[in-house]
Every structure is written in structure tokens, then in C-alpha cells.
Image (tube, rainbow, N blue to C red):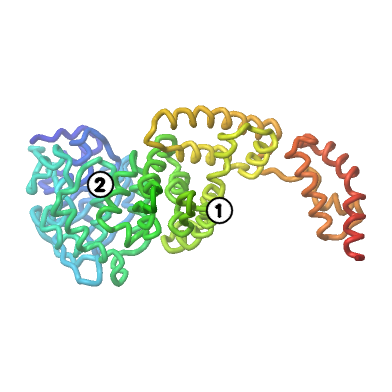
Amino acid sequence: MNFKIENKILKKISRYASDNNIQAYLVGGYVRDKQLGTTTNDVDIMVIGDAIQFSNQVAELFSVPVLAVYNNFGTALINIEDLKIEFASARKESYLKDSRKPIIELSDLEDDLARRDFTINALAVPLFKPHKIIDNFNGLSDLKNGIIKTPLEPYKTFDDDPLRMLRAIRFASTLNFSIAPETFEAINSLKSRLKENKVVSQERITNEFLLIMMGDKPSIGLDLLYLSGVMDIIFPEMAKLGGVDRREDFHHKDVFYHTLNVVDNISEKTDDIWLRFAALVHDIAKPKTKKFVEGTGWTFHSHEEVGAGMLKNIFMKMKLPLNKLDYVEKLVRMHLRPIPIAKDEVTDSAVRRLAAEAGEELEDLLTLCRADITSKNPNKVKRFLTNFEIVEKKVIEVQEKDKLRNFQSPVRGEEIMQICNLKPSREVGVIKKKIEEAILDGEIPNEYEAAKEYLFLIKDEIIKNSFNKSNK
């Protein structure tokens, strides 16, 4: 099959390669994505011979610097306008059992394509004419049929580099492909290699997991992780959500598949990975809090609090950025809060309290709660969403009108101490809390003068009561 090189930069590199009899090829993702009708700015060029020398020639041709050179791997990196181009010498690889870092030998086109992870990534196009796709492993057929499989025997491929198991699932998820049965079987058999002697770093595992989470429909990859058993290895807390317990006439819904629905729902609304991650872990503590109550059924009391408490350990273990921990904890802790408001008659006080506590995260919290509305009964979902929209609108209006974002008393602790002639003490906190409660209950507006006037109204009684208690 012929391949049309349309990019002006690649055309110029192609002419240079042809004019100088350099055997260079476009390989991997760029060729794959072009066949799928998409484009990428990441380009891999494989060279028979010295790729670093060719990268220097191309850099000189475009008057750009070579950004990085890795002599041990025979690779170099340059950027030309919006293209990130990596040059690599054709090679074959072998592996030691306790490392995914390959032992490299320079080789030819056939060996280089054979070492690649999947057939859809083992396509090559000569930069010299004719620009005809070289397809030694039926990658074009697998692209057409939407199949992920390895060029060589999958057990060998995954044993050499266990990270490829996660990459298989990630490609299947983001491309909406299926994994060939023998390839999936090898993943299931070799999944423990992902944690064996730290062959694969946690950072690489987490990066692949987050790439799955950033897909258009993350549930595809998450389900494959679960069905293959890989989830038990890389995120056991998630794997434990699966399954349904039955007692008498009571059963609860499968929390894992409910969670997948929530993640897909929220992914239709946001590309924010941390909001998506909050959706993923919002029910993470349900297995820990699950209890059967006779005559009532299954309960999960305080799963939101317990779940928020689990997150620091999860973040540390997965090496997720700790500066995102507070945000995810807050959403998990509060994810049930808007629901009762949507079910019952909405009081201004309840709305103010929700808006004040959510603060900057209010809109994200409401997005999460909306995504959490799932049921097999579409009429039930529609009815509840209609109610929730009314609440959502009111909560946002109240937050803006009453200036409740990052809410706290307009009269600060220092001023309370000065006016009341108090030292730092419990009484200062009580007075401050009373002012905040009055605002949230609608007794006074969220304004400095009103709060200060209210302070003068309540201070003597609070100080007197405190004095009496201390002298009993």
C-alpha cells in the first residue's frame, strides 16, 4: 500500500534522505495514526546505520539544535516547528529477567520491526521512494479489524517488557480495539511481572493508567484491567469493588461497574484528569463499609469519609502528585452531600452550607454528583436529573450572590479579640462560628458591617456563659 507524505517538514527530510542514499523510515505511531485518519506531532524515524549522525544532518538542514542524544540507545531528539522527531538506529533487543531495559545490538529493518510491541506499531514507510508501507506482521489488517496483537509470541513479548501489557490495554481502550485472545491470555498469565522485583517502575505503571483514564471512554480500559486481573496487581482497592453480594431478597449493585458508568459520564463533561480520578475513587471504601442490616439490606455508612481517608495511602503508593490529594479528598468526602438536597425540599440554609463548604470545588462537586446518577431505569435517571438541575442552579446562584466561595466570617479572629478584649482562646472561635452560622442561616448577609454589628449583639452573652462555665 502506498503512503502519501504530506507534511512539508517530512517531505524535505524525505528528499534529503533520497538525495543522500540514506535508508531511513517513518515507523510506529505516526504511520499507524495516519492510517486511522488522525494526525500526531510525534514522529519516529528509524535509520539503517547511524541515526545520531542523520539527526545532526537534519538539524543542520532546518537550522535547529539537536535537543537530546542517547548514545547507548543510538537515538536523538529534535523539534522542528510543531513536530517532535525522534531518530533511532535500527536494532534488535534482548532482555535480562530482572530488567525491562534492553540489551541493544545494531541490526536491520526486519529485526527492528519485529522488536516492536504490537503489529499496528510495526509498520514502516521508506523516506526514499517508493513510499510504500512495509507490513511484515499484518498490522494493516489488524488496524482495519481493530485488533491488538504482538508481532512475535505474546508470552515472550510481555515477559521481556511487562509494561507492554498495560500498553496493550491502553491502546485497546483509546482506539476502541479488542485484544487478540492469545495476547489477552498472555496478559492474564504474566500480570504478576508488573510487580516482580520492580522490573517496571511505579511511575511508568501510573502513567499508563492515567493515559487510560484520559481516553474518550475510560471504562473500556478499566474493564480490561479488571477482567485480565491486572487491576488486582496495580490498583487492588479498585478490583475489590467488583462483585455482588446477595442475602435473602437483597443484593447491591456491582460497585465496580457502577463506578465505570460514573467515570464515563464525567468524561463526557471534562478532560480534567483529577476530576475523573475523583469519580473513579468516589466509592472506593464501599467494600470496607459494607454491612447487611436485617430487614433493610446492604448499607455503606460513612463510605465517603472512610474513602477520603484511604486516598493518601493510594496517592503515595501510586506516586500520584500530592498537591492534588486535598482536591480529590474533598470531592470524595462531599460526593453525597448534594443528593439529599435534590431529593427533599430545598432550604436556603442547606444550599448555603453546601456552597460554603464546597467553595472553589462547588462546580466540580456538582459535576461529579450529576455523573453519579446512574440507573438501568432511564425514566428514573431523567426524573432525578431534572430535580438535580434545579438544585444545581440554585446552589450556584446562592454561592455567587452570597459570596460563599472560600467562605469564612467577614470579621476575622484578630478583630474579634481586639473588640472583645480577648486573648487567643476558645471564646474567639465560638464567636466566629456564631457569626458564620448566622450568615449560613440567612439571619444576616455575608457582609462585613452586618457581621460586625452581629458581633456586638452576641459577644457579651458568649463571654458571660464562658466565664460562668469556667467558675463552676
User: Label 2: how many residues lie within 10 Å, few (<14), some (14-19) or many (20+)?
Assistant: many
Q: Is residue 466 above or below residue 274?
A: below
Circle 2 — which element?
helix
> Who is closer to the viewer here, 397 or 30?
397
> Who is closer to the viewer here, 272 or 87?
272
Horizontal side, residue 459 vs residue 110: left or right: right
- Per the image, the residue denoted by label 2 is 171
Q: Position of residue 269 (x, y in %)?
A: 44, 35
Q: Position of residue 34 (x, y in %)?
A: 21, 36
- Per the image, the residue denoted by label 1 is 326
Task: Say whether marks 1 and 2 touch (CB < 8 Å).
Answer: no
The quarter holding residue 185 reads bottom left
Rendered residue at 8%/54% (across/down):
110
Mark 1 and mark 2 lie on one chain; the one further toward the N terminus is 2
Rendered residue at 91%/52% (across/down):
420
Horizontal side, residue 388 vs residue 147: left or right: right
Does residue 312 appear in the picture of this structure?
yes
Q: Is residue 84 above or below residue 312?
A: above
Rendered residue at 25%/41% (across/down):
175
Screen quadrant of the C terminus: bottom right
Q: Position of residue 369 (x, y in %)?
A: 50, 39
